[in-house]
């Protein structure tokens, strides 16, 4: 489910402002896939809410929590066209090849630490692309 897409980005060092080219790997979803994912999450949350009806006293909190939580999660999944998987490239500080796992967030800029040298990095669009978009 979903199409694997690769996008060109940059790793930018926060300490010395140098940049290195990198690749961001994404999963892109069609409109139909977005709707199916949203419906699956909604039904999953509501199934858990239905099971929670059987839990004495706690069901007063759990059932409404899972009911409304399902609506919130489903609406977010409905609006999510792309999910980030990881970003690969070389660190501008230590020059080692790195792979940074992403938390399903495909929006840029993002800030992470290099897994090798622990220096802060910014994941951003290439500067040439930023100036052409402005």
Image: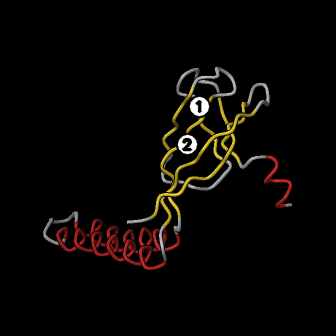
Q: Nearer the viewer, residue 106 or 67?
A: 106
Which of labels 2 and 1 is toward the front? Answer: 2
Query: Looking at the picture, does residue 126 appear above or below residue 98?
Result: below
Which residue is pictured at 15% across the width and 65% down the height? 55
Task: Kindly state the secondary structure of the residue where label 1 is placed.
Answer: strand
Please say if 106 is above or below 48: above
Q: Pointers 2 and 1 in contact (CB under 8 A)?
A: no
Residue at 28% over, 65% down: 62
Q: Residues within 10 Å of mark 2 (few under 14, many from 20)?
A: many
Screen quadrant of the C terminus:
bottom right
Residue at image position (56%, 28%) is 97
What is the spatial separation of the Cα atoms under label 2 and label 1, in whole angstroms? 12 Å
Q: Quadrant of residue 66?
A: bottom left
Percent of width and height locating residue 22: 63, 40
Mark 1 nearby-residue class (10 Å; few <14, some 14–19, many ≥20): some
103 left or right of 62 in image: right
Q: Which residue is mark 2?
A: 87
Place of residue 56 in the rendered image (x, y in percent of width and height, measured from the top left):
15, 66
Residue 131 in the image: state x and y as whole percent: 86, 54
Quarter occupied by the N terminus: bottom left
Q: How many marks?
A: 2
Q: How is the image coloured?
A: secondary structure
Q: Residue 85's x, y, as percent?
A: 48, 49
Q: Residue at x 37, y 71 (%)?
A: 70
Q: Which mark is residue 88?
A: none
Q: Is residue 131 left or right of residue 103?
A: right
Among the two numbered marks 2 and 1 on one chain, the one whose residue lies closer to the N terminus: 2
Which residue corresponds to mark 1? 113
Q: Is 131 rendered above or below residue 40? A: above
Secondary structure of the residue carrying numbered label 2: strand
């Amino acid at each position: 489910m979903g199409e694997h897409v690769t996008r060109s980005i940059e790793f930018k060092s926060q300490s010395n402002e140098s940049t290195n080219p990198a690749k961001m790997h994404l999963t892109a979803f069609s409109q139909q896939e977005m709707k199916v994912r949203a419906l699956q999450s909604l039904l999953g949350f509501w199934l858990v809410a239905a099971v929670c009806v059987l839990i004495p006293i706690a069901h007063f909190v759990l059932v409404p929590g899972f009911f409304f939580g399902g609506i919130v999660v489903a609406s977010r999944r409905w609006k999510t066209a792309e999910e980030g998987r990881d970003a690969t490239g070389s660190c501008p500080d230590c020059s080692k090849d790195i792979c940074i796992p992403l938390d399903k967030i495909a929006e840029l800029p993002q800030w992470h630490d290099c897994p090798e040298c622990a220096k802060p990095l910014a994941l951003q669009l290439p500067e040439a692309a930023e100036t052409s978009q402005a």
